[in-house]
Image: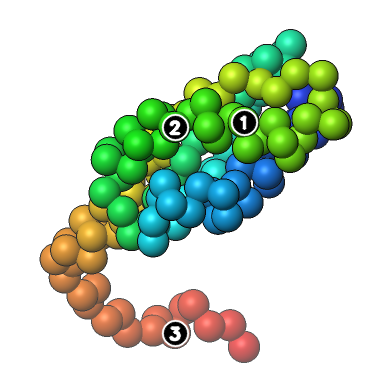
Amino acid sequence: MESKRQQKYAKLIQKELGEIFQREAKLLVGRAMVTVVRVEISPDLSVAKVNLSFLLANNQELFEKINEHKKEIRKHLGNRIGKNVRIVPELAFFLDESSAYAQHMDKVISALDIPQAPEQEEDDDDQED
């Protein structure tokens, strides 16, 4: 279980990375919307596992591009939080598939051919006076 310190640190990193992807890394991500879904921080605060989700992008292509520019993104993070923390954590990015899975399940469910239930007549026994 994460300590309060880890949770506080993870929230700070999540917020700052979200802003970095909106501003500083705009050239890197283009029109794509990058969502920092979740951040988990190691107990010694040296490694941040960052789950990302994308809209309007080729997920794998953008994910690889972000990984190639990990040092640059970490530098932006350091500029933003460097005064508040002793060390800027190493970033480990992961592709969050939950939204893609939700969309897939939505398609599967809407494609199901479920017959209408026969209408049942109300029994007099169910209603008490």
For the residues labelled 3 and 1, the Cα–Cα distance comes to: 73 Å
Residue for badge 2: 69
Up-down: is 54 above or below 116?
above
Q: Label for residue 109?
A: none
Q: Residue furthest top?
A: 44
Tag 2 or tag 3, which sits nearer the N-term?
A: 2
Please tell me which residue lies in front, 9 or 89: 89
Residue 41 seen in render: yes
Residues 68 and 117: in front is 68
Q: Is residue 10 visible?
A: no
The scheme the figure's colours follow is rainbow
Q: Position of residue 44 (x, y in %)?
A: 74, 11
Helix or strand or loop: what does disc 3 sit on? helix
Q: Nearer the viewer, mark 3 or mark 1?
A: 1
Q: Is residue 89 above or below residue 100?
A: above
Mark 3 Cα shell of 10 Å, populated few (<14), some (14-19), many (≥20): few
What x and y, as percent, mark residue 125?
A: 47, 78
* Disc 1 + disc 2, Cβ < 8 Å: no
Q: Quadrant of residue 87?
A: top right
- Quadrant of the rendered structure where residue 110 is? bottom left
Is residue 71 toward the left or the right of residue 105 in the image? right
**Which residue is drawn at the image coordinates 62% and 31% (left, top)?**
75
Q: Badge 2: few (under 14), some or many (20 or more) residues near its Cα, within 10 Å?
A: few
Q: Could you say which disc has been placed on residue 75 in the image? A: 1
Q: Nearer the viewer, residue 52 or 74?
A: 74
Task: Identify the residue at image location x=68%, y=46%.
Answer: 15
- Amino acid found under the numbered disc labelled 2: His
Q: Marks 3 and 2, Cα distance to the nearest angstrom?
A: 71 Å
Left-right relation of 31 to 3: left
What's the residue type where badge 1 is placed? Lys
Is there a contact, CB below 8 Å, between mark 3 and mark 1? no
As measured in the structure, the alpha-carbon distance from the residue carrying label 1 to the one carrying label 2 is: 10 Å
